[in-house]
Image (spheres, coloured by chain):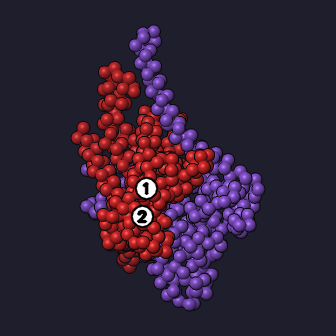
Amino acid sequence: MVERREGRMGRRRMTDVGFRLSTGAFAGLLVLIVAAIGFELTRQSMLSIEKFGLSFWRTEVWDPVAGQFGALPFIWGTLYSSVLALVISTPIALGIAVFISELSPNWLRQPLVFLTELLAGIPSIVYGLWGIFVLVPAVRAVETSMPPMLRQLPIFSGPPLGVGMLAAGVILAIMVIPFTSSVAREVLKSVPAAQREGAYALGATRFEAIRAALFFARTGIVGAIMLGFGRALGETMAVTMVIGNNPKMSASLYAPQYTMAAVLANEFTEADTELYLNALIEIGLVLFVITLVVNSLSRILIWSMARSGKGPTVVPIEPAEEAA
Amino acid sequence: MTRSRTRKLLSSAFVGCCALSVLVALVPLAFVLFFVISEGVQALNWDFFTKMPKPVGETGGGMANAIVGTLLVTGLGSLFAIPIGVLSGVYMSEYAGTRLASVVRFSADTLNGVPSIVIGVFVYGIAVLPFKQFSALAGGLALGIMMIPIIARTTEELLLLVPGTMREGALALGATRARAVFSVVLPAALPGIITGVVLALARIAGETAPLLFTAFSNRFFTTNLNQPIATLTVMIYTYAVSPYKDWHRQAWAGALVLVMIVLICSLLARFSTRRIEGLQSGG
C-alpha cells in the first residue's frame, strides 16, 4: 500500500528511522550507564575479590594497617540500621498514607502532601548536621534516663554515648518516612472505591473499611515498605555523622557501629594501598547489588498491584475524585 | 450493643493513630527547619557569600569558593544530564511499547535507586583514577548521572500527558515524527520538563556523598574544571565534623542556604506544574 518508490515518502521514512535511532541511542546510553556501574565496580575490586573470596563477607576484622579486610561489621551495621529504621518508620508512614488518602479533609490534603515532600527534599547533609547537634544529645539524654533494669538487656548495653545505632535508626526513619508514605498513598489510590463502599454497605466501621482497602493493597504496601528499605540501605551522610563509625558488631542500640555507605564515605580517600581501595570498592559493589535487588523486587510488587488494582473484577460505581 | 461500641471505639482509635502519625512525622520536620533557620540566620551574613574560608583558628570568612563550586558542578551535571535525560524520555514515550523502552524505563528506575555514594565510587573509577586527579568535571559527571533518571522519567510522563490529538494533527499535516515531537509535543510539555529539571537540580544541589571523592574539596578559589573544587555540601560536612565552634556556625549557615535553594526550587517546580495542569484542563 505504501508508495515506497516515491522519493518524499522514502525521505520521510529515513528521517523517522533516524529519529528513532538517535533518541534510541541516548536511551541506550542510560542502560549502558547502569551496566557500566556494575562492570566497573567489579573490575576495580578484582584484587580484593580474588584475595579474600567469600571470606570477605564472613570476616569480622577490618584492619587496614595489617591488610586485613572483612566486611561483616559493615553488612551487619547496614542491615541493623535499615531494619531499625523500617520498624520505626513503617507504622508512621502507613498512618500518614491512610490519613492523607482516606481521612484528611480536602483542604488539608495538598498542604500535607507538600510537607511530606519537603521532608523528603531536605538534603541528607542537613539531617546529618541536625543529627550531630540536636538529635545525638537528645538520644544521649534518653539513653541515660533508661531504667537500670532495662540496661541489663543486651540491646541497651554499653555506655550512653548518643552517637550509635539508635541515633542512626531514628535519623534514617525520618528520612525514609516520606518515601514509604508517598508510594503507599499512590497504592491506596489505586484501590477501587467499590472495595470500601462494599465494606461500608456491609456495616463496616471506618477502620474496618480501611482495613479492607489495606488488605486489598497489601502487595503494593509491601512494595512501598521495601522501597523505603532500599533507600535506607544506601543512605550515607546523615548516618555517617551519627552512627559513631566503629567497625565492631554489636547487638546494642547504644553501640557506635558502621555501615557500608559510611565506611566508603570515611575511608575512601584514605585508602593508601591498592588492596585497601579494592576492598572498599567491593563494598560498593555489594551495596549496588543489594539495593538493585531490593528496589527491583519492590517495583515488581508495586507494578503487580497497579495491574491488579485496575483489574476488571470490580467495577467502580462512581469514578473517583478526578471527575470532581 | 457492646460489640458495636468496641468496634466504634477501635475505629476512632485508629483514626486518632493515623492523625497522630502525621503529627509525629511533622515534629522532626519542624525541628530541623527551626534549628536550620534559627542557627543559620545568626550565622549568615554577607561575608558568607563573598569571603573565602579563613585558616583554622581565625574566625570569620565565608564560603564564596564553595558556592561558586556548587554552581559549577551542578551546572556541569545539568549540561551532561539534560540532553540524555530528555531524549531518553522522548524515546520512552514515543516508542512506549518497544522492548528497549521497557529496558530503559527499568534502567532509569534502577539508576534512581542506586545509592549516591556508589555513583561516587563508580565515577572515581572512570574519571578520577585514570587521571590521578580529583576534578570538578568528575563531580559534575557524578551529579549528572544522578540527574538523568529523574529528568528522563519526568519527560516521559509529561510527554504522555500531551493530548494525542496534537501529535496526530501534526502528523496529519504531513510532519515527520521528529518534526511532530520537536515542534508540537515537546513545546507543549516544556513547562513540565523544566519542572523535572528543576526538581532534579533541587535533589542534586544537596548531594554530598557522590562529591566526596570526585570533586573532593579545595580551600582555595578555583574555576578550573580539572582541579578539585569546593562545594557547599562537602564544606558543610567538613565543618560539621570539625571541633571548631566557628566552623559549626558556618556549617549552619551553609545548611540554611542549601535548604533555601531546595525550597525555592520545589516551589518553582510546583508553580509550573500548576500551570501545565491548568493548560491540560483548559485544552
Under circle 2, the secondary element is loop
Residue topped by disc 1: B221
Q: Residue at x 45, y 62 (%)?
A: B235
Q: Nearer the viewer, residue A294 or B65?
A: B65
**Above-or-below relation of B227 to A260:** above
Amino acid type shown at disc 2: Pro
Q: Chain B appears in which tint?
A: red
The N terminus of chain A: image quadrant: top left
In the rendered image, residue B24, in percent from the top left (x then y), is placed at: 39, 72
* Residue A288 relative to residue B177: left or right: right
The numbered disc on residue B53 is 2
Amino acid type shown at disc 1: Phe
Q: Nearer the viewer, residue B223 or B175?
A: B223
Q: Residue at x 39, y 54 (%)?
A: B68
In the rendered image, residue B267, in percent from the top left (x then y), is placed at: 30, 55
Q: Residue at x 38, y 79 (%)?
A: B2
Under circle 1, the secondary element is loop
Q: Chain A appears in which tint?
A: purple
The numbered disc on residue B69 is none
Cα separation between marks 2 and 1: 9 Å
Which picture quadrant has residue A202? Answer: bottom left
The numbered mark, 2 or 1, whose residue comes first in the sequence reads: 2
